[in-house]
Image (cartoon, helix red, strand yellow):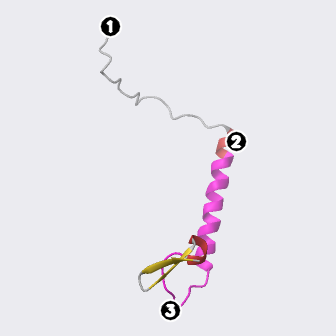
Amino acid sequence: MSDPSETPEPDTGSKPKQLSPAAERALAEAEARRDELAEADRKRQRELGGRGGKDPARYGDWEVKGIAVDF
């Protein structure tokens, strides 16, 4: 009987798990969506002289002189 505290070695000689067609299609769609978002982000016009950081309207607070206020 083997010692229960010993962990078995991973099987390095086996093939990677085969994905179903639906899973492969979902991964391809997600990759395409990420590419579209990245392209849209590159095309978006940048604000000149803005405050920087994340959009306060989206995240629910505004920072003024180091103090964050909710609106």
Residue at the spot x=60%, y=85% of the render? 45
Q: Residue furthest top?
A: 1
Helix, strand or loop status at disc 1 = loop
Q: Which residues are magenta?
A: 25-54
Q: Amino acid at mark 2?
A: Ala
* First in residue order: circle 1 vs circle 3: 1
Assign the N terminus to one quadrant of the image.
top left
Whole-percent x and y of residue 5? 30, 21
Figure quadrant of residue 4? top left
Q: Observer-nearest residue: 63 or 50?
A: 63
Q: Earlier in the sequence, mark 1 or mark 2?
A: 1
What residue is rendered at 63% in x and 49% in y?
27
Q: Is residue 61 above or below residue 7?
A: below
Relative to 45, residue 54 above or below: above
Q: Which residue is mark 3?
A: 49
Q: Which residue is mark 2?
A: 22
Marker disc for residue 1: 1
Q: Of the residues tagged 3 and 2, which is closer to the observer?
A: 3
Packing grade of label 3 (10 A; few <14, some 14-19, many >=20) is few
- Please tell me how crowded label 1 is: few (under 14), some (14-19), or many (20+) other residues with Cα within 10 Å: few
Which image quadrant is residue 37 in? bottom right
Upstream in the sequence, badge 3 or badge 2? 2
Work out which quarter of the rendered image holds the C terminus and state it: bottom right
